[in-house]
Image (tube, rainbow, N blue to C red):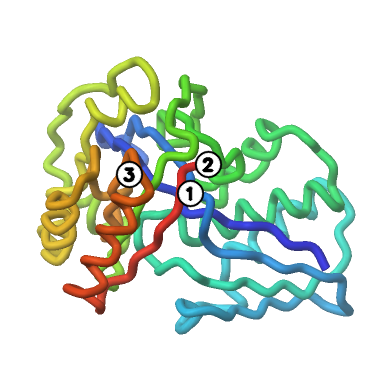
Amino acid sequence: MHTEPAPAKINLALHVRARRPDGYHEIETLFAFCRDGDRLEVEEADADRLTIVGPFAGGLSTTDNLVLAALAAMRRLGDIPPLAVTLTKNLPVAAGIGGGSADAAAMIRLLDRHYVHVDDDNELVAATTQLGADVGACIVGRTRIGQGVGTDLHRIPDDLTGCPVLLVNPRVPLATGPVFAAWDGVDRGALSSGTARAVALAGRNDLAAPAIGLCPAIADVLAALRRSDAWLVRMSGSGATCFALFDREADRAKTRAALAAERSDWWCLESTLA
């Protein structure tokens, strides 16, 4: 049995610069990753099969799934036997924190480590770009600047490793397409330069306003988190998940306890940045 974590992805900043003729958008984003998320377990079997368990397993397909698409893509790089895959789905779906991209990336890392042995993140990213714009960043799993559609990855001085983070989602799924379609088309400028913390503080999420228009509960989550001792509160990606970054674990725990008392219907995850 082989296992691999599929950590939650967050966009510390997300600047939308332009619509492209192909329907995608030029973006600049600061990716970061939590230490917690979904989990894959894989063992050799007589035929491929995917089982999904966990609190957010409901409604997910076990035949049309990015985990299986990742398996098919990796078979083009090497010999992989039939596999029985169990995905423990701890993260909400369509939530702006990686979701299927994180799961696909976990499968790619696991298959490379045990079967394919490319041992080169850049080559793995290039070989699997067809799986989605966030998959490459999730394969790397470290703080990076993403440009283009998010697939052009660049290192940044990372002073956020170990930073306490709280993720909160109002349990409302929000698809990416409608949020990008509702963007007002205004280029508000590039990411700043400096360390990850400096870039995050100076940044913004250009999709927050259109997302709130489609899902007003996001505004409630942001307001609740802004009453905490967090040094940064923002929506992640294009989904309804918001995050708060703290200097102290005690402040994160206090905020989580307050939310549990006030909004027990919201999903929360306490973690740290990788």
Looking at the picture, tell me which residue is in the foreground, 104 or 248. 248
Residue at point 40%, 58% (across, down): 270
* Residue picked out by circle 2: 274
Residue at point 69%, 51% (across, down): 108
Q: CA distance from mark 1 to mark 3?
A: 30 Å
Q: Which mark is residue 34?
A: 1
> Do the residues bearing badges 2 and 1 touch, measured as CB atoms within 8 Å?
yes
Q: Amino acid at mark 2?
A: Ala
Crowding around mark 3 (Cα neighbors within 10 Å: few <14, some 14 to 19, many 20+) is few
Looking at the picture, tell me which residue is in the foreground, 111 or 226. 226
Could you tell which of marks 3 and 2 lies nearer the N-terminus? 3
Q: What SS does tag 3 mark?
A: loop
Q: CA distance from mark 3 to mark 2?
A: 32 Å
* Residue picked out by circle 3: 23
268 horizontally vs 155: left or right? left
Q: How many marks?
A: 3
